[in-house]
Amino acid sequence: MTTLRRCDILIIGSGIAGLSFARKVEGQGRVVVLTKKGPSRGSTSLAQGGIAAVMDPADSFERHIADTLDAGAGLCDRDAVEMIVRQGPQRVEELIELGAEFSRDDDGGLDLGREGGHSARRIIHAGDATGREIQRVLIESLSGSRIELHDDSLAYELILGPGPDGRNQCYGAWSVEEGEVVGYLAKVTVLATGGAGKVYLYTSNPEVATGDGIAMAFRAGCRVVNLEFVQFHPTCLYHPLERSFLITEALRGEGARLLNIAGERFMPGYDERAELAPRDIVARAIDAEMKASGAKYVLLDATDLGAEVLAERFPHILSRTRELGYDIVTKPFPVVPAAHYFCGGVASDLHGRASLPRLYALGECAFTGVHGANRLASNSLLEAVAFAHAAADDVGKRLADLEAPPDDYRPLTPPEVREPEEMVTLDHDWDEVRRLMWDYVGIVRSDDRLRQAADRLRILNQHTDTLRQRGFFCRDLIELSNILLIGQLIVQSALLRRESRGLHYNRDCPRRDDATGAKNTVLAQYGYSAFTAES
Ligand SMILES: Cc1cc2nc3c(=O)[nH]c(=O)nc-3n(C[C@H](O)[C@H](O)[C@H](O)COP(=O)(O)OP(=O)(O)OC[C@H]3O[C@@H](n4cnc5c(N)ncnc54)[C@H](O)[C@@H]3O)c2cc1C
């Protein structure tokens, strides 16, 4: 049996984007938040470095804007960048009012850190576990509120229906809860489902990052933009039991050095900024060293920092590496690059509205134009809170005028979960997609490898389609279909971009070409096309 529930505002995702928005619309009717595996299992809790904002009188909005535009390699939307930068101080103050305890200097002021690409100290952090602190206060703020949180609910399809003009509108979403299909009918739906790092074999992202929001929006006819720009973080810990533990670049900022497997320092040979070169350059250099030696990792040497600095500035990294058997105070330890952040996503405007009426997209699943071809460190948490604020404002103005959706909706999928007899085939497909994406659509790309990936992904897709046609329906299959779709969208976007820029590097067109490339790659369901810059 299919259950249908009604609410006014449906939010899918409980990271910084979803919960910041939820807090701001509390009281405007019934607000429901869905999250698929516990409220704090997204990327937000893992954020280490911090949140960027202009808090120092010696800094300025203009400098933060210029740094962001510079990192974005000619593709940022200036209005979107200005919007987040100017909101920064207010949004940070709000987090502090909520109870976030950020690190302080000796005078009691905020201890502002500095990261690669920022021309000033403007990173507000809570030691090296900033995201955990932000997620904590956001979850605590729910207690005693009227916001309903369903914390084992996997949304898999948007509910569509014709609006007054005959065009499709978003009327909520179908989800799987405790083995059953539940429909949530809502006046407004917000996608805040985070990124899609699980498309790749190595990722800093958590289990939940399977790109569900982007996949749902694309299937519903929304435009998705710039999916070729995947940020690979240069340094994740290499350990069989810990595949996604990020080693913040602040460690390199404090003096840690990268060594190849022979123990030789290699970064100065790639860039004069050595270990402090931008992330994409460091990640490509590590990739080249690993390919040249055949090793599965390179080494990070933090021994010069000393036990005291490591314990004070990087307590989380120190304790986790110790638990895993590494003594980073006295010995170099193994690291690999890993898929980290998606600059592209569901096209959304300055109010967070997606191209489908009544649908919003916030946080990492959205494409707002802020990051362009490369994200400046610590701007994503800022983007999430700034756009959550703008969207809440917009929804507040519109909600009373929106009619509730009719309730004669039935899902096209089976009403309950049915797993294939042999789950091993799903496991195999999962592994194959992730390895294929890593090997063929990773840090350094080529036309030939991209085309081979496209062919193979198409075949894997046929397999999941067959399973669905045979009536199978379960979480693993839903998520697998989503990573397959995201993989295909990344490949199509990468093939459309006939240049290398920012995070996208193709050996067959290795140079930036402003004559043809200074535009976003926009994909929509009824064809793939590249348009002149738009968002
Ligand atoms: C290791 C790491 C370190 C980082 N460090 C920084 C940093 O220092 N500074 C910075 O600015 N950025 C950093 N980032 C990036 C930043 O953390 C993320 O971009 C940001 O937290 C995304 O927030 P979000 O709310 O969009 O998504 P998330 O926090 O990922 O939340 C997504 C939510 O959606 C839910 N969800 C997903 N799919 C479904 C579905 N189908 N149905 C129901 N629920 C669903 C998930 O369960 C989760 O609750 C880091 C990222 C990682 C992985």
Image: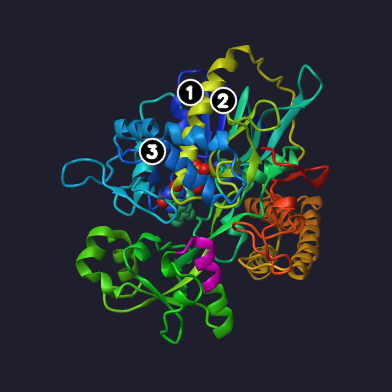
Which residue appears farthest toward the top when viewing the image?
A: 401
Count of numbered labels shown in the rendering: 3
Q: Is residue 464 above or below residue 444?
A: above
Query: Ligand 1 closer than 8 Å to the CB at disc 3?
Result: no
- CA gap, disc 3 to disc 1? 31 Å
Label 1 sits on a secondary structure element that is helix
Q: Nearer the viewer, mark 3 or mark 2?
A: 3
User: Measured from the top left, where is residue 185 in percent x and y?
Assistant: 64, 26
Which residue appears farthest toward the bottom when viewing the image?
A: 262
Marks 3 & 2, CB-CB < 8 Å contact: no
Q: Is residue 218 left or right of residue 188?
A: right
Colouring chosen for the image of the structure = rainbow
Q: Nearer the viewer, mark 3 or mark 1?
A: 3
Label 3 sits on a secondary structure element that is loop
User: Measured from the top left, where is residue 347 in percent x and y?
Assistant: 66, 38
Q: Is residue 111 above or below residue 301?
A: above
Q: Which residue is mark 2?
A: 9
**Residue name at image x 80 percent, y 60 percent:** 458
Question: Looking at the picture, which amino acid does disc 2 mark?
Answer: Ile
- CA gap, disc 3 to disc 2? 36 Å
Question: Looking at the picture, which amino acid does disc 3 mark?
Answer: Ser
